[in-house]
Amino acid sequence: MHGGARLVGEVDVVGAKNSVLKLMAAALLAPGTTTITNCPQILDVPLMGDVLRGLGCQVDIDGDTCVIETPEELSHLADSAAMGKLRASVCVLGPLVGRLRKAKVALPGGDAIGQRPLDMHQSGLRKLGATAAIEHGCVVAEAEQLKGAQIWLDFPSVGATENILMAAVLAEGTTILDNAAREPEIVDLCTMLQQMGAKIEGAGTSTLTVHGVSSLQPTQHRVIGDRIVGATWAFAAVTTRGDITVRGVNPHHIELVLEKLRTAGAEITVEEESFRVVMPERPKAVDYVTLPFPGFATDLQPFAIALSAVSDGTAMITENVYEARFRFVEEMIRLGADARTDGHHAVVRGIERLSSAPTWASDIRAGAGLVLAGLCADGVTEVYDVFHIDRGYPGFVENLNRLGATVIRVPA
């Protein structure tokens, strides 16, 4: 990418990566045809399709529509090669245990952003009456019968909330899940499960009450807009001192992000499913602390660092979720950023302009963050391992170039 670009224009955001993959897994709960629309055209969607095919489903992905034919006779063994390529593959665990009362699920892959153990997933299933353990690289769970239980999560884990929820909807009796994750993607999953016949109360709060039912029915569901992608474009506008209108995402899902960017000096107007971010001058440095929703999302930490690197003043970014995300700082230093890390904290002193250099993406958001940083550097910056970006951003290069950047995707 060539430095010095000011991004101006409009961009459309499609369905949320962090929602669609879990919705696809939820289709396992009901035999028949489930249709999911507004799917993002990213690498992880066909990978999850491969996971479901390995379990016996027929999966047809056409544009932004995914049609899943779930058979009456479903395999409980999820060990296809695709399992090791994305973290969300572990979300077939809950539906398989819920419907089949047994599952053997290969440990997932995904981004290299730190430890993400499955202890809470297993503990929740045990509370519901299943045995659960990690054996030979797989999570193995089995139950004669699932019964509702009172479950407390030590941390509001999104993945554990989703797996326990999808097992509990077909359990006998009532399950109360406390300290549950509150992300909009959890609400989206609850909405789809309710459309399938599940009885769930408290979506969007820290307490989910699930009244188990004997069976569910397939449904049609539209994925919510991707708040992380929407926020990425908001940061892009501020970082490059641009003017971007973002459509297709609920601004209320990123209220804290937009407030932080206002503090940095941005002019922001919001509507029901869109918002506009205008940055007329050099941004001011702002501190960030990552926390579970409704806090500042850890996925957005790289963009906060990239913005801070060119802001006026000094910012402190505190990472409370994934310790390895600060690998991004090492790449920013290649670009001339004045930054250092100390445990959970990164201190970034802003400079007027970064310097171009070759960089390497370690995960989805780090890759996109390096591209935005490169747009603020002198000369031409290269970002390698951009297959990570493909897992979270459909048409990323095309959108950047439509907004006025000069970015070239070079085939490997």
Image (cartoon, rainbow, N blue to C red):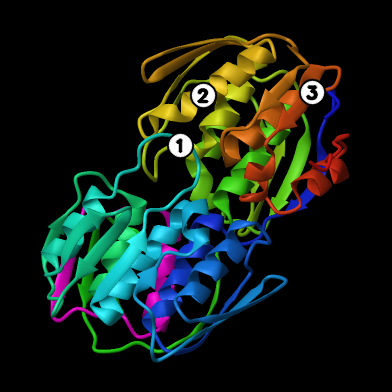
Q: In the rendered image, which residue does mark 2 sit on?
A: 327
In the displayed structure image, the side of residue 9 where residue 305 appears, left or right: left
Q: Are marks 1 and 2 in contact (CB under 8 Å)?
A: no
Does residue 150 appear left or right of residue 105 in this picture?
left
Residue at figure coordinates x 83%, y 44% from the top left: 9
Residue 146, x across and y down, in percent = 15, 76
Quadrant where the image shows the C terminus: top right
Three-letter amino acid code at the position of disc 2: Arg
Which percent across, then down, holds residue 206?
Answer: 26, 54
Q: CA distance from mark 2 to mark 3?
A: 18 Å
Spatial separation of the CA atoms under disc 3 and disc 1? 25 Å
Judge whether 337 appears above or below 131 on screen.
Answer: above
Question: Which segment is the magenta one?
Answer: 169-198
Question: What is the crowding at mark 3: few (fewer than 14 residues within 10 Å), some, or many (at least 20)?
Answer: many
Q: Which residue is depicted at the point 45% across and 57% down?
A: 88
Does label 2 or label 3 sit earlier along the sequence? 2
How far apart are the alpha carbons under marks 1 and 2?
Answer: 13 Å
Secondary structure of the residue carrying tag 1 is helix
Mark 3, mark 1: which one is toward the viewer? 3
Dot 2: what SS?
Answer: helix
Marks 3,1: beta carbons within 8 A: no
Mark drawn on residue 245: none
State if disc 3 and disc 2 touch (CB < 8 Å): no
